[in-house]
Amino acid sequence: MITLDKYLEASAAQHSHLCPRQVLGIRAALVATDLLELDTPCPDKRLLVISETDGCFTDGVRVVTGVSVGHRTLRIEDYGKIAATFIDVKQGRAIRVAPRAGVREQARNYRPEEKRRYFSQLHAYQIMPAEALFKIQEVRLTTPLRAIISRAGVRTECDQCGEEIINEREIRRDGLTLCHSCAGKAYYVAINELKPTKQD
């Protein structure tokens, strides 16, 4: 069994330092996988994690669980929240873990000798009981798990822009197959088309 210290070392090595949010990510992943009775790191695609932020917290989650965007076992729904939902794909059970309100202030009670809040949080988050540190909820997904996971390798083309759409992410409207951008859900607006400055 891998110890908390080993996860902290691994996260610090990957991230170039250790910060309080990484500790939260590591501890959240340990709590959730324990409740789901899953091994860590998860050796297959049985675990799906939906993180509500990018950055340090998610790096901590990754170190424990082994999930990744490339293996389609990690999704980012950037709500700007230090929280994640851990889903046992086989059982369909989902557990959301988030820090309790006021946890930063509570950290001082666990490490009162630390003068700086950052270090108080960094060290306290490692020793605080999970029930004091986290709000842990069993949740029901609002999108069916099958739709979230989809089928890898399924391809189609957008009838409007011609770009390929994979993993069943197309939108069907008025008899057309559209990508999210052409369906009006783009995160960008195209300005013009560019050519590479260097030729291969």
Image (tube, rainbow, N blue to C red):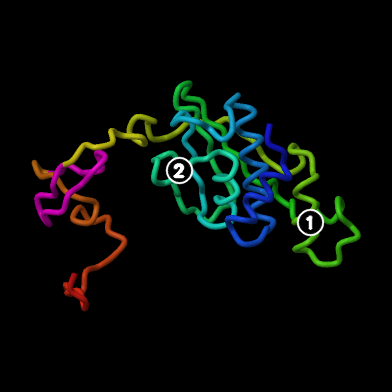
> Which of the pair 153/78 is nearer the observer?
153
**Element type where label 2 sits in the image:** strand
Percent from the top left, x then y, of residue 160?
10, 54
Q: Quadrant of the C terminus?
A: bottom left
> Which of the pair 103/36 is nearer the observer?
36
Nearer the observer, disc 2 or disc 1? 2
Residue drawn at (61%, 33%) of the image: 32
Magenta-highlighted residues = 156-173
Residue drawn at (17%, 74%) of the image: 195
**Element type where label 1 sits in the image:** helix
Q: Residues within 10 Å of mark 1 (few under 14, many from 20)?
A: few
Q: Quadrant of the N terminus?
A: top right
The stretch drawn in magenta includes residue 33: no
Q: Is residue 195 above or below residue 181?
A: below
The amino acid beneath tag 1 is Glu
Residue drawn at (9%, 50%) of the image: 159
The amino acid beneath tag 2 is Leu
Determine the residue located farthest toward the bottom in the rendered image.
Answer: 197
Q: Which residue is mark 1?
A: 105
The stretch drawn in magenta includes residue 161: yes
Disc 2 from disc 1: Cα separation: 30 Å
Percent from the top left, x then y, of residue 167?
26, 40
Q: In the picture provided, is 191 more to the left or to the right than 77?
A: left
Q: Which residue is mark 2?
A: 74
Percent from the top left, x then y, of residue 100?
70, 46
Of the numbered discs 2 and 1, the one sitting upstream in the chain is 2
